[in-house]
Amino acid sequence: MPILGEECSIFPSDLLDEFSSVSQRFETDDDFRWWTIYARSRQEKALARHLLAHEIPFYLPLVRTRQFVRGCRRCAHLPLFTGYVFMYGTADQRVTALCANRISRILSVETPEELVSDLRQVRDLIASDAPLTVESRLTAGARVRVKRGVLRGLEGRILRRNGKTRLLIAVNYLQQGVSVEIDDFMVEPI
C-alpha cells in the first residue's frame, strides 16, 4: 500500500517526446525556455503540484521505492534527483513558480537540447523498472549503446563497480546520473 498515491511527474505527458513539437505548441515567441529548479528540502512534489495547478510544463523524475515503516512494507514515489524539478516556461511562469515559496534557486538552462535528451533517457530507464542507483560527480568511461533487451537504444557510459558492469545514464547539466546493472553482451561501443 503506498504512503501516497502516484502523482503526476510530467506535464504535459509528451513534454520530452518531441521537444520541437512541444516547443512549437507552447511557443508564440522566444520567451519559452528550460529552467532547472532546486527546491527547498522535501518540497519537490508540492512544487510539482503547484506547477500542475498553473498548467506550467515540468518534469520531476520519480522512482518507486519500497520501505519498511513500523514493520509494514510501504511503497513511495520519491524524486530521483533530490531537490530538482525541470520546468519549461516563460519568465512570467518562472515568477509564478517562485510564488509557491518552495524554491531555493532557479537556473536557466543554456543547452536545452542536451538536457532534454538526457532527461528522455532517464525517463526511459525509470519506465524499465530496473533497480537504479543515483551517481554523483560523473567520471569518464567507455561510451556505449544498449543493443538488446528492454533498454535497447539507450546510450550511456560503462562503469565497473564491485566487479559488476553498470550502464550510467548521465544528466550532465546536474553532474549526476543513474546507473543500472547490465551484462557486457548487451552493449556495443559507439
Image (tube, rainbow, N blue to C red):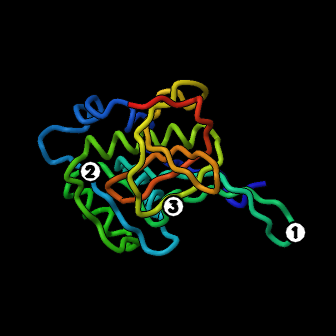
Residue 12 visible in the displayed image: no
The image quadrant where one finds the C terminus is: top left
- Give the amino acid at mark 2: Trp
Mark 1 or 3: in front is: 1
Task: Of the two numbered discs 1 and 3 on the same chain, state the one appearing first in sequence.
Answer: 3
Report the front residue among 60 and 150: 150
Mark 1–mark 3 Cα distance, whole angstroms, equals 26 Å
- Pointer 2 or 3: first along the chain: 2
Q: Which residue is at the front of the view, 94 or 178? A: 178
| Residue 43 left/right relative to 105 | right
Label 2: element kind:
strand
Mark identifier at residue 45: 3
Give the spatial CA distance, label 2 vs label 1: 42 Å
The residue that appears at 82% across and 60% down in the rendered structure is 73
Name the residue type under label 1: Gly
Relative height, residue 37 to residue 186 (above, below): below
Q: Which mark is residue 71?
A: 1
In the displayed structure, would residue 91 be above or below residue 187? below
Provide the residue designation for mark 2. 34
Quadrant where the N terminus sits is bottom right
Tell me: 152 left or right of 105. Answer: right
